[in-house]
Image: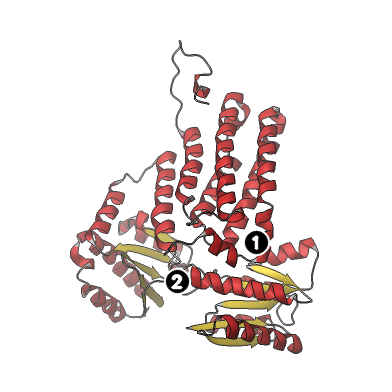
Amino acid sequence: MKFNVLIAEDEKDFRDILVSIIEMIFAKYYASFELQISVADNGKEELEIAQKEPQDIIITDINMPVMNGKEAVKRIRLFDKSVPILALTALTDEKDVEEIIQSGVSNYTSKPLNQKLFIAQIRSFVNLFVKSGFVYNKNALNLISKQVFKRKTIFNIEWVEDVEEFWEYFMEQNSLLSNIYSQDILQNIYNLELLMIKNNIANELVLEENEDSYYITISQLQLLGEKRYVNFLFDDKVDMRLVKQDNNFITFLVAKNQDQADQQQEAQAVEKKENPIEMLQHELQEAKELDLRYTVDEKISAQELADELDPSIEDKIENFEEDIESLRISLYDLEEAKKEEARKSLLAIVELLENFDKTVENIGLFNVVSRSFSSLVRFLKDLDDEILFDLKKRILLITLIRGLVDDLEQWIVNVFLECTTSDIHYFDASFAENCLEIEKIFLEPEKEQDENEEDDESLEFF
């Protein structure tokens, strides 16, 4: 298996040392890999090499001539959001380090080089690449799943004949065409490509697949223009539950078999106009079906994860217990806070949850948990004053979050500290459901209370 490593460093002697260490790591631990090392003298060369050929790891100095490492990383992240990037820097100021992290690097190490730490960081990247089903794959273009699929086909679309070639390819896939619903999606794709051609827009149509589904991605949407694109979605009756999009790409999810198609038809039958509760429920369902199903190919034990964690992440995990205690203190402060201090106390809780989210996201294997953190943080940030200033509602919210914190503590102990669980994803779906439940309770319309009921009945179950 080929493995590409790019080293960007303007000091030749130090660059040669890095090359030697990388060669030693792969010779000792990954002899089966076909290692290819590319080198760059500055950020501009680094960017050009990364654009020319996808890389599996990028090691970059920060202070380089022509273009510095931070700028190069920012530009690389525009077209490759998942390649691990390790920054090398002599800067130690906290603000400088924060800027380096914000540029999009996966991790950093200080100069002069701590060789033991550097080797551990590189091995961590490679081990996770192998163990977790190629989590860091940059070849997965679709927006729905980052899994590496067993097949990928690229169609360069410039003329109508190119679209017809794509169409004929699918006509040969009898199982795909066994249901009318899949044909409707293919017709959407066909019509969008014809619209692109009509407007002289050449693009790539990328087909990826796994056992159950096809993922079909069309690029260059920004050249079509927002108005034309929105009109197409409306006129062609595109089912927005089965696509994901950003400014440049759209990915269509297409079932391979009838069971999958039936599930898609059920999704289509749901009313387009949903209330907030239904939207949250569909987000949870998406988390289960896409994140859990497509990103976890095999069980990974907590001990296996611990053996491969980056040392810098391990340091943050050791602080989890302290953060949990801080969360409990902040919840107590919110419970006791006066109206004018309540928002400040709530933001302290939000900040602690965001710190958890960042650490979990850096590990790269807990998509459902990270999504749940993000959703809950957004909910708390936008929490209505009506809830925050109503003591009864505030106590209910605090009680629910305390239960979530207790669950979170157990997860941290089992997965990261004592490493006892045989499957690090056993907690994902239940945590997502607990986060959803908190949002759901406060989004549901209040029921009128019977005059004979006591005022505090809503808290009886606690």
Residue 21 position, x and y percent, is: 67, 84
For the question of whether residue 144 can be seen, the reply is: no
Q: What residue is shown with label 2?
A: 140
Residue 20 position, x and y percent, is: 67, 87
Q: Which of the two discs, 2 and 1, sits closer to the camera?
A: 1
Query: Which residue is more in the foreground, 183 or 84?
Result: 84
**Residue found at the far top of this picture:** 452
Q: Residue at x 67, y 77 (%)?
A: 60
Q: What residue is shown with label 1?
A: 313
Q: Earlier in the sequence, mark 2 or mark 1?
A: 2
* Amino acid on which disc 1 is placed: Ile
Query: Which residue is more in the foreground, 419 or 40?
Result: 419
| Relative to 241, 44 lies left or right | right
* SS class, disc 1: helix
Q: Is residue 127 above or below residue 301?
A: below
When asked about the image quadrant of residue 325, the answer is: top right
